Image (cartoon, coloured by chain):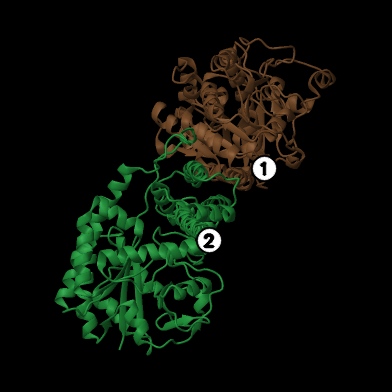
Amino acid sequence: MKALMFGWEFPPHILGGLGTASYGLTKGMAMQDDLEITFVIPKPHGDEDQSFLKIVGACNVPIVWKENEWNYVNQRIGLTMHPDEYFWLRNGIKYDYNRIYTNDLGCVDFSGRYPDNLIEEISNYEAVASVLAHQMDFDIIHSHDWLTFPAGVFAKQISGKPLVIHVHATDFDRSRGQVNPIVYGIEKRGMDAADHIMTVSDLTRKIVIEKYHQDPRKVTTVHNAVDPLPDADSFTKTPRKDKVVTFLGRITMQKGPEYFVEAAYRVLQKTKDVRFVMAGSGDMMNAMIDLVAKRNIADRFHFTGFLKGRQVHEMLAESDVYIMPSVSEPFGISPLEAMQVGTPSIISKQSGCAEILTHAIKTDYWDIDAMADAIYAIVKNPAMHKSLQELGRDEVNNIRWQDAGLKVRGIYESVM
Amino acid sequence: MRNICFYFQIHLPYRLKRYRFIEIGQDHYYYDDFQIEERIKAYVEQSLLPANRTIAEMIRSSNGKFRCAFTISGVTLDQLEHYAPEVIDSFKDLAKTGCVEFMAEPYAHSLSSVFDATEFERQLKLHADKIETLFGKRPSSLFNAELIYSDEIGEIALKMGFKTMLIDEAKHILGWKSPNYVYSHSYLPKLKLLVRNHKLSDDIAFRFSSLSLTAENFIRWIASLPEGDNVINLGMGYEALGITQPAYTGIFEFLKAIPYHAMEHQMSFMLPSELSKKNESAGPLSVPFPISWVGNDKDLTPWTGNDLQNEAIAKLYAVGERVRMCTDKPLLRDWLILQSTDHFRYMSHKDAWGTNYESAYDAFMNYMNVLADFLERVDAQYPTTIDNEELNELLKTINHQEAEIELLENELKKIRARKAKVEDSKK
């Protein structure tokens, strides 16, 4: 079976959780020997891991016919695509896209990020999809998130092949209810046209059914998993006098940072041997610094700024408790990552990962008393910490992408 | 002749309220009165009263041939006295018929038999006193909480004067042996063991409605047991009558029809104490490690299966000796209530039967907060710097000081008198 996937991000150059999830899922699906995946992203950098799938850069796919020498093409894009493939794909141009600004190869220069002219990039991506749909051979189309829905829908119209879409987040999560009508329109059209919709949690599934008016029979939850961390043991915890409780993520309304500060305030009223860390950056960072000062706990509350790569795991491993009080989280991979390095997690019930985790403490995001209670219990009771650590690690190591891959495969087969 | 022995367990723990860590040291009341009342009322209305009525009627209509035994935990009796004294009266009425037996169990329905032998004895005594005051007869059979039994526990029971103990049919203990005989302790033949027939008991308690069981069939099953299987112990939670098997399933009618069909097959009903008196032991049973009546493994893992449970139990029983030296009444009462097995069962990851918590961790957090406050109160009674032995000595000195003073004063008087006499004689 051949699957044509449209994505927006792919590691190592990622901006959010979408890239990580795309990578994990495709890797898990590649365990099935008879499945061939072609993954389209706007702009590859050439250092992506292509051992288990084929990556096609939309920025290398011609949408306007231009005559070029083989050597010149090789010199321009040889790093990410073979020139023969370029010429072969050029035969797939069936429409006149001269209205779109293209370069000397007839390709669009995608940024591959989330620029201001995102809507324009999305529609250019759609044009690329038409070329691929005409020229390539595939059995199913799989679109990741709303950015790629139009491309998937167009490919379906051209090829007549079934389309499944994967909802990693909806605009309701991102905007806390104040949806952007253009984004909503794109999402809704994609869902309407899809033969099946996959969501990353039951929470998201409910939003898709209720807010986008989809037939529940057409929507299935495929929970995300977590990539095994091969060097999990290399992250160690430095022994220290004070316990460390960490919040890690964008400091923005969706993640509920103010609830963390309030919970910290309550804990510090009872005990002094705890330090709180807020790692990350975001639009609410200054407001949080103000709040910490107002509560008079600044001596016990620390801001680290933005962390990336290995620093993230190091910070998680150094912590005694990881807390994610998100107001709305379609899935939320970070508690799973914390549990991988043996750090107990407290998560809000409003996050998708709560649906599959047993050995994590779940509270409502607004219930700061419960949150403070959980923090206190973990830092004061070694048995609690040990239990969450050991059982949590086992649990997370059993949440595997290949199982999610099998579920996706079942959905493919049901729509074909 | 086949003998059927029915016995019912009645236990309802005190539910803890949501107790946040911030309240440690501030609030010393741990119970969710609303939930407790709600639960006891439901139990009373759906099960206790209708079931007691049914049993009274069965005794009456069979002319006292029907007999059965009860074990009611001390904490449940306390709740009944508080919220539903009419149930106590109804049990007293049953006691007057002479056809029911009240068995002993640790007052708090606790795991003390495994973790604190002194506490176990204290609670058995406390419970026996309570049963005697309420129902007029001191129990002679022991139904340990959750039917926990081991050779060691049996030894304590016999030492306390119990001649009969009830245990569950654990495959790894009985092996090929049938549960339908009377057995005895592995090296103390005076203690008789009655083995609960696991299958037939659960047929009523858990499978009654799904099996569409009739009294006729049920008695026929018993009648078709192999020759020699003369003692059929049917033990279950009393809530099976009316709650697990609601009244509309016909459970009460089923029960009422039992004596008639049993007598048709020349079977009789007996109480645990009568069974052990009238039957010789078929052989000793060796139980080196504790067994219980829960799950397939019949072991202690529902209460001691994970780190959380072990931590909570260790912290609780570590202060047992110290608490028993205290005289503060509310403290002693809390000590009992906090020992109920249920609190630890709720902390089980796989078998948190009857829990009102969202997860094992939730149960643990709440219990540990309560326990932290309780331990602070224990510490406040006597400083922790003094160890138990020293404290015991000091307490003895304090409690005896009046007698001591009197003794010394008397001595002083005598000496003075003698001195005066000597001086008089000198003059």
Residue at position x 60%, y 24% in the image: A130
Q: Which residue is mark 2?
A: B115
Q: Is residue B300 visible?
A: no
Mark 2 residue crowding within 10 angstroms, few (<14) / some (14–19) / many (20+): some
Q: Residue visible at 39% across and 41% down? A: B29
* Nearest to the observer: residue A12 or residue B295: B295
A283 horizontally vs A306: left or right: left
> From the viewer's perspective, is A140 left or right of B19?
right
Question: In the rendered picture, chain B carries what hue?
Answer: green
Compared with B279, A100 (above or below) is: above
Distance in Å between CA atoms under marks 2 and 1: 54 Å
Q: Position of residue B221 (x, y in %)?
A: 32, 80
Q: Which structural element holds mark 2?
A: helix
Residue B305 disc label: none
**Front-most of residues A260 and A31:** A260
Viewer-side residue, B304 vs A51:
B304
Task: Say if mark 2 contacts mark 1, CB within 8 Å.
Answer: no
Residue carrying label 1? A30
Q: Colour of chain A?
A: brown
Image coords of residue A249 (percent x, y): 61, 25
Host chain of mark 2: B
